[in-house]
Image (cartoon, rainbow, N blue to C red):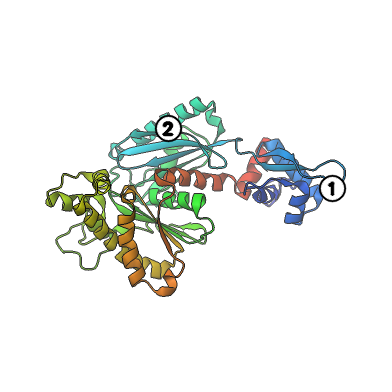
Amino acid sequence: MSEAGGLSPTLVGTGDLFQLLRDGTPRTRGELARLSSLARSTVTARVDALLSSGLLEPVGEAASTGGRPPTRFALNRHDRVVLAIDLGASHATVAVSDLGGRVLGQRTVECDIADGPVTVVDLVARIGVELLDELGRPSRDVAGVGIGVPGPVEHATGRPANPPIMPGWHDVDVPELLSRHFGGPVLVDNDVNLMALGEYVTSWQESQHLLLVKVATGIGAGIVSDGRLMRGALGSAGDLGHVQVAGASADVVCRCGNVGCLEAVAAGPAIAAKLQAAGLDVTGSQGIVDAVAAGDVAALRAVREAGRDLGAVLATCVNLLNPSVIVIGGKLSEAGEYLLAGVREVVYQRSLPLATHDLRIVSSSAGSQAGILGASAMVIDAVLAPRAVDAYVAQRTV
């Protein structure tokens, strides 16, 4: 056993070489040798080990420069699958993806997060097994499980930390509960963090600094900086909904106990309450979106005003974090340009010109899939990291 990760010397560095193939571009042994600066014989040994493990597959031949055309190799996306779970306050979405992040099967069901961790985890695990059966994949093919929950999480342990809308979930060992059903690592994160990651990997990888804002029953943000999620010391980074809005009435009490919080004045329930007070029969975020789509003037004005309140808080975030793109997601983002117009109006007015020089403020491109795509990407990054690949190759080639 070697000191580097406890693997035999012939396998040390195999995972590092594999990283050159994760971008999806097929490459020959010669190309890998040039990119890695390794000897051709070393590359050949490591490629052979990756082929034997199932992580690589041959994908045709390159143009010949004389003699037999060289073979190109690429990530075998079908070697294993990932189980991705997105939990909301009243729903659960479970999906199976390949190692390239492509969703192979998915199901969404009604589910009350307040039913508690054992009931909810058993439900999503059962759905996961059913999806695997439909795809003809045994549970042993699961490389890992990613799950997003609607509350703060200590990412290192996967334990929710005092989540306000998740009674009975505080400090619960969610990875242990899911490990009873599936092998591989179980990674847990806040749902908005995973939405941010999902948006980043699908649409914005050229923008290393992204802020995803979810506007629905609550308001939260996921922060990507230098291409990595920022979670904060205790997992509560991005809790945008509980920033006080300047000028908000002292009578507006938030569920956190403070007054004038952004969530209490600009989230779905707050907007719906204003419209109901004006005599409009609107219930919840979907009702607001429907009223906007129908052209109701009161709804249009209320959504734009909510956008301005959101923009007032985001202007500070822009000056502090200097993102290159702000993505507005969540159910209320379906109100389209009316919400975005309010956000843009205030952000561009109150933020520093340098911070907004190249700033884009856009609607979500991944939509309701963002959380699932982010959960899948989180697991794929973990199980295809160099040390994880080294360990997998060693296991498969014993």
The amino acid on which the numbered mark 1 sits, given as a three-letter code, is: Thr
Q: Tell me if residue 189 comes above or below residue 126 in the rendering.
A: below
Q: Position of residue 164 (x, y in %)?
A: 28, 49
On the rendered structure, is 130 left or right of 163?
Answer: right
The image shows residue 349, relative to residue 365, as above or below, that is below
Q: How many marks?
A: 2
Q: Amino acid at mark 2?
A: Ala
Q: Which x, y percent locates residue 366?
A: 44, 47
Point 53% across, 55% down: residue: 205
Foreground: 224 or 148?
Answer: 224
301, 131: nearer the viewer = 301
Residue 26 occupies quadrant: top right
Can residue 150 be seen in this snapshot? yes
Q: Nearer the viewer, mark 1 or mark 2?
A: 1
Q: Secondary structure at mark 2?
A: helix
- The x, y position of residue 298, in whole percent, is 19, 53
Residue at image point 50% right, 52% down: 203
Residue 144, horizontal then vertical, whole percent? 52, 39
Q: Is residue 256 visible?
A: no
For label 1, the crowd category at 10 Å Cα-Cα, with few meaning under 14, some 14 to 19 and many 20 or more, is few
Residue behind mark 1: 65
Q: Earlier in the sequence, mark 1 or mark 2?
A: 1
The residue most toward the front is 295
**Disc 1, SS:** loop
Which image quarter holds the C terminus?
Answer: top right
- Number of the label disc, if any, that sits on residue 212: none
Picture quarter containing residue 234? bottom left
The residue lying furthest to the right in this view is 67
Q: CA distance from mark 1 to mark 2?
A: 52 Å
Q: Give the labeled residue for mark 2.
A: 125
